[in-house]
Image (cartoon, rainbow, N blue to C red):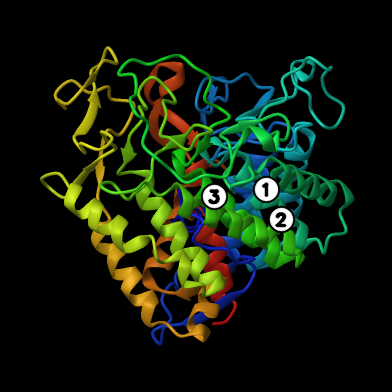
């Protein structure tokens, strides 16, 4: 995954992504890599990806070299594409960035094709599932030509799925000056669905197929339950208020971007309402941080069988970042007020080696873990391997950033809202461009040795969308910088 993609994924870049500051070093590195060679490699790679790898304009995560084995988070037939990053929106946004840097029309065409794959797989509920299967339209209530009344119609906000699709569509809609009717209409439809799905207190569920009934979700502050079950209750949790997997962080980023692009105050209000929800959801002492998910009474609650009612050392760090981003956008210090007690709590809760537990027991603050049989325990010697029960602590860097924000002027804050992407012709960029050119095979594919985990195959030549995005970013950035040489 490219550094730029990580930036977008974390919701730290709310800008339009289409303005670049280009500067060159005095010694003009990369002289051995020509503009023509970089452009040729970009076109060869794009032609191969769009004509051979793509399914109706969309993409998965990984493929075998012969394209017979395909997968996203799990195995996929040739008719399926993935929405969850680093799938179709991630690739589409890479095409769009490359077009904005180089002006090559075929890159814009590739971005539009990826967008239309998303348009054609948009659910009637407004967003997207983890994947789109074009051969199984009857199973899904797609907004355009798909499915019957009993077909699946659940929008997922988990794992940046709908948010990533919408982020890409907003940027492309702007680039197209809002003149491409299907893309613009789908973008507006998704944004309106997210506004309707937001709870009265400003939170969002992990998934939805219709708007909530406001009376079922009173606006109250987070509180501790009198007791909670140590065994997974197998209750439905998808309508709970959730922070899991940085869901709110991604949604706030999309809403601020939408406000910036469309100048519609509804989107800014939704982002600020989410900030107010974060304030409401901060647990009282002795644990003034956040849970992964809350029931309608704003009490930490079970989600999956390895996600107990608790205070989280994981998502709490992402929530602090989100509060800082809302402050950057608004200058309202009420969004900074929850941060000092949360940082002090997390610092006090650190494990040896600068780590944090993903889960801390309510009130006692003892770290909670699971055995491989999913039994709740205080011991960390028999953990399942699919989930991060012990995570890195970013408390020191978060505290440093918080203190810096306190000193920043309003002008400085304004400059941080939609930062310019800086592209410089450095030896490192030239080396990356040369590596991308040299590693492209005769067909136009970038191959790497790796595993197809979902297919159970190891150590084979694979086509990885993350590698494609990295190399396309390197080549297009090199071309953009070289143009100023």
- Direction front: furthest residue: 226
Q: Nearer the viewer, residue 3 or 149?
A: 149
Is the residue under label 3 in contact with that under label 2 (CB below 8 Å)?
Answer: no
Check disc 1 and report the residue beneath it. 166
In the displayed structure, 379 sits above or below 47; it is above
Element type where label 3 sits in the image:
helix
Element type where label 1 sits in the image:
helix
Element type where label 2 sits in the image:
helix
Is the residue under label 1 in contact with that under label 3 (CB below 8 Å)?
Answer: no
Check disc 3 and report the residue beneath it. 250
Q: Which mark is residue 148?
A: none
Check disc 2 and report the residue beneath it. 170
Q: Nearer the viewer, residue 246 or 377?
A: 377
In the displayed structure, 101 sits above or below 393; it is below
Which mark sits nearer the N-terminus, 3 or 1? 1
Residue 421, visible in the rendered structure: no
Q: Nearer the viewer, residue 156 or 480?
A: 156
Is the residue under label 1 in contact with that under label 2 (CB below 8 Å)?
Answer: yes
Q: Residues within 10 Å of mark 1 (few under 14, many from 20)?
A: many
Q: Give the residue displayed 62% in from the left and 18% down from the top.
A: 77
Which picture quadrant has residue 299?
top left
Q: Nearer the viewer, residue 335 or 129?
A: 335
């Amino acid at each position: 995954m490219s550094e730029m993609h990580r930036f977008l994924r974390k919701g730290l870049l709310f800008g339009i992504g289409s303005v670049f500051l280009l500067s060159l070093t005095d010694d003009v590195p990369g002289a051995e890599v020509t503009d023509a060679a970089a452009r040729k490699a970009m076109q060869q790679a794009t032609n191969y990806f769009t004509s051979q790898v793509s399914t109706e304009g969309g993409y998965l995560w990984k493929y075998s070299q012969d394209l017979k084995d395909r997968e996203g988070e799990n195995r996929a037939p040739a008719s399926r594409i993935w929405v969850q990053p680093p799938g179709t929106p991630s690739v589409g946004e890479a095409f769009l960035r490359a077009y904005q840097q180089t002006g090559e029309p075929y890159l814009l065409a590739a971005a539009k094709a990826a967008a239309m794959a998303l348009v054609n797989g948009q659910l009637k509920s407004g967003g997207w599932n983890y994947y789109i299967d074009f051969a199984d339209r009857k199973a899904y209530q797609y907004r355009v030509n798909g499915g019957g009344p009993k077909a699946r119609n659940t929008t997922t906000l988990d794992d940046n799925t709908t948010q990533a699709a919408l982020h890409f569509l907003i940027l492309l809609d702007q680039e197209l000056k809002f003149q491409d009717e299907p893309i613009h209409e789908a973008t507006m439809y998704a944004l309106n669905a997210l506004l309707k799905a937001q709870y009265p207190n400003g939170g969002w569920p992990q998934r939805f197929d219709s708007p909530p009934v406001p009376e079922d979700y009173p606006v109250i502050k987070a509180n501790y339950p009198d007791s909670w079950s140590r065994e997974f209750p197998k209750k439905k949790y998808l309508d709970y208020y959730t922070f899991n997997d940085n869901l709110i962080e991604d949604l706030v980023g999309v809403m601020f971007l939408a406000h910036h692009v469309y100048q519609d105050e509804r989107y800014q209000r939704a982002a600020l309402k989410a900030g107010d929800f974060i304030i409401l959801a901060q647990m009282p002492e002795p644990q003034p941080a956040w849970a992964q998910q809350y029931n309608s009474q704003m009490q930490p609650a079970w989600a999956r069988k390895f996600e107990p009612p608790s205070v989280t050392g994981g998502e709490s760090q992402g929530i602090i970042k989100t509060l800082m981003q809302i402050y950057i956008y608004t200058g309202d210090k009420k969004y900074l007020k929850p941060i000092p007690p949360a940082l002090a709590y997390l610092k006090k809760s650190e494990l040896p080696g600068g780590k944090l537990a993903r889960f801390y027991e309510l009130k006692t603050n003892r770290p909670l873990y699971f055995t491989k049989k999913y039994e709740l325990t205080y011991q960390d010697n028999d953990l399942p391997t699919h989930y991060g029960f012990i995570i890195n602590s970013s408390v020191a860097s978060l505290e440093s950033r918080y203190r810096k924000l306190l000193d920043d002027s309003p002008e400085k804050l304004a400059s941080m809202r939609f930062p310019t992407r800086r592209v410089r012709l450095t030896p490192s960029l030239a080396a990356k461009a040369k590596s991308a050119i040299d590693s492209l095979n005769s067909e136009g594919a970038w191959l790497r040795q790796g595993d197809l985990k979902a297919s159970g195959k190891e150590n084979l030549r694979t086509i990885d969308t993350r590698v494609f995005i990295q190399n396309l970013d390197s080549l297009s950035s090199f071309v953009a910088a070289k143009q100023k040489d």
